[in-house]
Image (spheres, grey):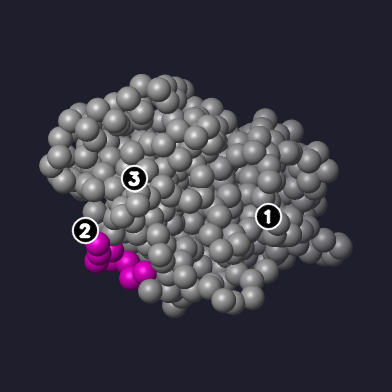
């Protein structure tokens, strides 16, 4: 993300290219009307407190979370929030296609540990504020299940107690649907105190609706691309964000949160994941990390489907258009066969054909830590990106911290940003 300050105007630039499927029901605003309103506000008053306009480039989880906490906690400092996205949609890329798996303590003892714990709590708060049922937020359990791919030995029934997928009684015998998978063990990874899930696309849409409902702030969704460099006047004051057609939107702060499309020191790449949404015979409440058959990951949802993924591509510079990432049939087949074999074959819990096939890129940095903070030598420009596979989990706390940093100059009390400084890759060999 990037932040720019022009007088008292704030521009937040966010690129959502890394989030979910195209198009939301929200229509992008007219560029012409947006620019006219922006110019009227900037010319109608000389008060440094009047023109407080924020542009966020990218409409994914990071940008939307930042906009949400700006409107919720700092609306007295803001006139308008504008999301600029290449697709013109909310959450067109990874933020709409991710699994939405949330874990409280899996990042403990790492630099993102406090960020993760704060965000896990914020997800619970968001479920209260935005209607948890509508965004498919719920607590559930998680286990690692070992599957012997070549063993002919019958699984031990005691080992499979607690494997929700075996059958309704959590037992197994020679006729069980899980027998072909040859499950040999289970290791609990978390319970309802530490594991949760949310539907990322539904969450992003709900946050945007909440942002729009704040009558103290004008909100806009604009289709377009923002140039990497911000616009400054001759005195070095930030004056706006330039769109791909040359139009400049007045702003005082710019936030760049463009996922793998974020251009900062050539340090951002994307890891492409394919996923398949498979109907299940009943609602399941146990996320599973299989050990065997390619180690697929399965996140069941409360609508009797399961989000299945695995087999990531190597990191690359991302050139595909956000929300229009190619879906390769061979990758989907690999995932489907893997989870089918691991869960008991064609008659197992994941034996039916997928109802949705998709792909997206997860933004990744050389040290696997996000970029968060103000960009050196670009006053008023901020960045927040590179959260990898934990983008949905860490989105709310990232947005809360960035909203505070951009409006007060200090991060939230829950998150220390020293490890996430954008300049840490300067003069260092990268990929």
Residue name at image x 23 percent, y 42 percent:
52
Q: Which mark is residue 239?
A: 3
Q: Secondary structure at mark 3?
A: strand
Q: Is residue 1 visible?
A: yes
Q: Position of residue 17 (x, y in %)?
A: 56, 42
Q: Nearer the viewer, mark 3 or mark 2?
A: 3
- Name the residue tied to disc 2: 408
Mark 3, Cα crowd under 10 Å, few <14 / some 14-19 / many 20+, is many
- Judge whether residue 101 can be spotted in this image: no
Q: Which numbered dot is residue 258? A: none
Q: Say left or right for 20 vs 417.
A: right
Majority secondary structure of magenta residues: loop
Q: Earlier in the sequence, mark 2 or mark 1?
A: 1
Seen in the image, is 68 located left or right of residue 426?
left
Q: Dots 3 and 2: beta carbons under 8 Å?
A: no
Q: Is residue 123 above or below residue 187?
A: above
In this picture, which residue range is highlighted in magenta?
A: 408-417
Q: Which residue is mark 1?
A: 317
């Amino acid at each position: 993300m990037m932040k720019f300050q022009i007088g008292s105007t704030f521009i937040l630039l966010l690129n959502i290219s890394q989030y979910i499927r195209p198009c939301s029901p929200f229509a992008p605003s007219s560029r012409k009307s947006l620019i006219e309103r922006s110019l009227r506000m900037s010319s109608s008053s000389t008060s440094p407190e009047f023109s407080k306009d924020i542009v966020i480039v990218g409409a994914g989880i990071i940008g939307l979370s930042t906009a949400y906490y700006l409107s919720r906690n700092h609306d007295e400092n803001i006139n308008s929030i504008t999301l600029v996205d290449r697709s013109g949609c909310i959450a067109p890329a990874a933020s709409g296609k991710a699994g939405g798996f949330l874990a409280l303590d899996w990042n403990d003892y790492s630099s993102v540990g406090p960020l993760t714990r704060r965000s896990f709590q914020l997800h619970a708060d968001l479920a209260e504020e935005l209607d948890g049922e509508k965004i498919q937020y719920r607590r559930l359990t998680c286990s690692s299940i070992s599957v012997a791919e070549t063993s002919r030995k019958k699984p031990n029934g005691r080992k499979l107690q607690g494997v929700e997928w075996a059958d309704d009684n959590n037992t197994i015998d020679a006729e069980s649907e899980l027998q072909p998978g040859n499950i040999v063990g289970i290791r609990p990874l978390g319970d309802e105190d530490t594991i949760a899930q949310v539907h990322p696309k539904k969450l992003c849409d709900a946050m945007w609706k909440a942002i729009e409902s704040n009558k103290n702030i004008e909100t806009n969704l604009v289709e377009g691309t923002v140039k990497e460099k911000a616009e400054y006047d001759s005195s070095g004051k930030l004056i706006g964000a330039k769109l791909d057609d040359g139009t400049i939107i007045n702003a005082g702060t710019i936030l760049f949160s463009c996922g793998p499309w974020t251009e900062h020191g050539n340090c951002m790449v994307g890891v492409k994941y394919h996923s398949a949404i498979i109907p299940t015979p009943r609602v399941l409440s146990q996320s599973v990390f299989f050990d065997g058959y390619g180690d697929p990951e399965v996140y069941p949802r409360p609508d009797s489907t399961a989000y299945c993924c695995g087999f990531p591509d190597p990191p690359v510079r991302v050139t595909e258009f956000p929300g229009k990432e190619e879906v390769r049939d061979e990758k989907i087949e690999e995932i489907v066969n893997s989870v089918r074999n691991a869960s008991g074959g064609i008659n197992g819990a994941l034996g039916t054909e997928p109802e949705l096939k998709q792909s997206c890129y997860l933004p990744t940095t050389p040290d696997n830590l996000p970029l968060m903070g103000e960009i050196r030598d670009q006053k008023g420009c901020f960045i927040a990106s590179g959260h990898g596979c934990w983008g949905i989990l860490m989105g709310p706390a990232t947005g809360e911290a960035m909203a505070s940093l951009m409006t007060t100059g200090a991060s939230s009390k829950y998150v220390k940003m020293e490890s996430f400084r954008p300049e840490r890759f300067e003069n260092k060999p990268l990929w």
